[in-house]
Image (cartoon, grey):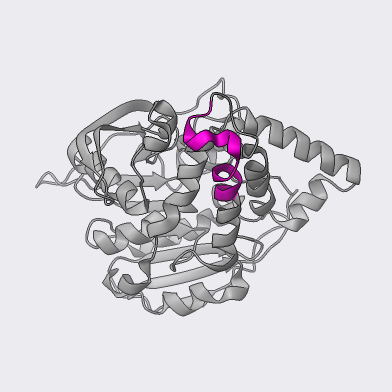
Amino acid sequence: MSARHPSLSRDTSLRSAASLVFAMLIALLCAPCAAQRFEVHEGDFRIASFRFESGETLPELRIHYRTLGAVQRDGRGHATNAVLILHGTGGAGTQFIGSKRGDELFAGELFGPGQPLDVQHYFIVIPDSIGHGRSSRPSDGLHAHFPKYGYRDAVEAQFRLLTEGLGVDHLRLLFGTSMGGMQTWLWAERHPDFSDALMPMACLPAQIAGRNRMWRRMVIDSIRFDPSWEGGEYRQQPSGLRPAVQTLLLVSASPVTRQQAAPTLQSADELMDRSTAELLGSTDANDLLYQVQSSFDYDPGADLEKISAPLLAINTADDLINPPELGILERQIGRVAHGRAIVIPADSRTVGHGTHTKAAVWKEHLVELLKISQR
């Protein structure tokens, strides 16, 4: 495989299409798709006495996961076709498959016959991160006594799921969106030889700071400083959960997308009321508090030179959480030996941060990454 020089390019060939509102967390609200097109196997991997980097332990950590396809191995028994897909903050594997939007926008574009990650040829693994989905989380009963977890704990649990639970000792591709993209950067540094290719989306390879940290503090403080939170032992969801989820709704989509979806005062209020009610009906305050604060240990900047596999980082120009004006991706990608970055221009198909799950917008770049990383 020939080395690729670091570069930053902008995709200018995206065709116009009708805009589609897609925001972080909304995938969780979709009803299960009645006609599942892919055979999905679900399971729970349980780790006894899991020790967190904080020093705390959990007698049993449960990691829920989904798999599609079958693992293939070479003559020495090493996995050759495994793909790990990691979701974003507040999400779960259902944002990729198992919900109507996930099936249409992600799985339907990638996993079918002849598509980039055709499950006839790839073994797809999609876990729920610690504190998310059906994995162990504060709302299971420990509430605010649940161990403080960070992104590095999530990576360790995912590594053990693959190696101990599924017998996967190597990945063909590691792909993550938002929080999952940040975990991809950490994976690449902690296990540099584990994956043939890396594709973090909708994130930056730098410590959470600036406005990104500030909106997270808004979510955290809305819950933590609400007297009805009662130190995490509330009997009904605290009132601070409302401004917390509304903050997420505000930052997760582009201004253009929101204006198109709500062009009048009345329609904006109706959209906010409807979306807030849906999120309040499906979100636990302790779970959300832990999910948002878990980014505290994310800082891949010091070890970017350790990344050895081909890496393609993709952001969009209308992402309010990771705006290109910061220039962070441009500066950092040059430190990755085989790194490349693409900032997709805003157009009628991008929807801000949530573009990471609209595979039709960026899957051509995934195809290229798989091609150049072939062994």
Residue 367 visible within the image: no
Read off the magenta span.
Answer: 219-234
Residue 17 drawn at (x, y percent) = 73, 51
In depth, the one of 31 and 235 nearer the eye is: 235
Spot the residue most to the left.
76
Residue 35 drawn at (x, y percent) = 55, 21
Residue 221 shown in magenta:
yes
Residue 185 visible within the image: yes
Q: In this rendering, would 352 be left or right of 119? A: right
Spot the residue most to the top.
34
Q: How many marks?
A: 0
> Vertically, is 282 above or below 130?
above
Instruction: Determine the residue positioned at 47% across, 44% down.
Output: 291
Residue 153 drawn at (x, y percent) = 31, 49
Instruction: Determine the residue positioned at 36% across, 66% down.
Output: 300
Image quarter (top left, top right, bottom left or bottom right) of the C terminus: bottom left
Q: Quadrant of residue 121?
A: top left
Determine the main secondary structure of the stretch shown in magenta: helix
In depth, the one of 4 and 190 nearer the eye is: 190
In depth, the one of 39 and 168 nearer the eye is: 168
Q: In this rendering, would 72 be left or right of 5? A: left
Residue 261 shown in magenta:
no
Image quarter (top left, top right, bottom left or bottom right) of the N terminus: bottom left
In depth, the one of 23 and 142 nearer the eye is: 142
Instruction: Determine the residue positioned at 29% across, 44% down.
Output: 158
> Vertically, is 288 above or below 352?
above
Residue 284 drawn at (x, y percent) = 53, 32
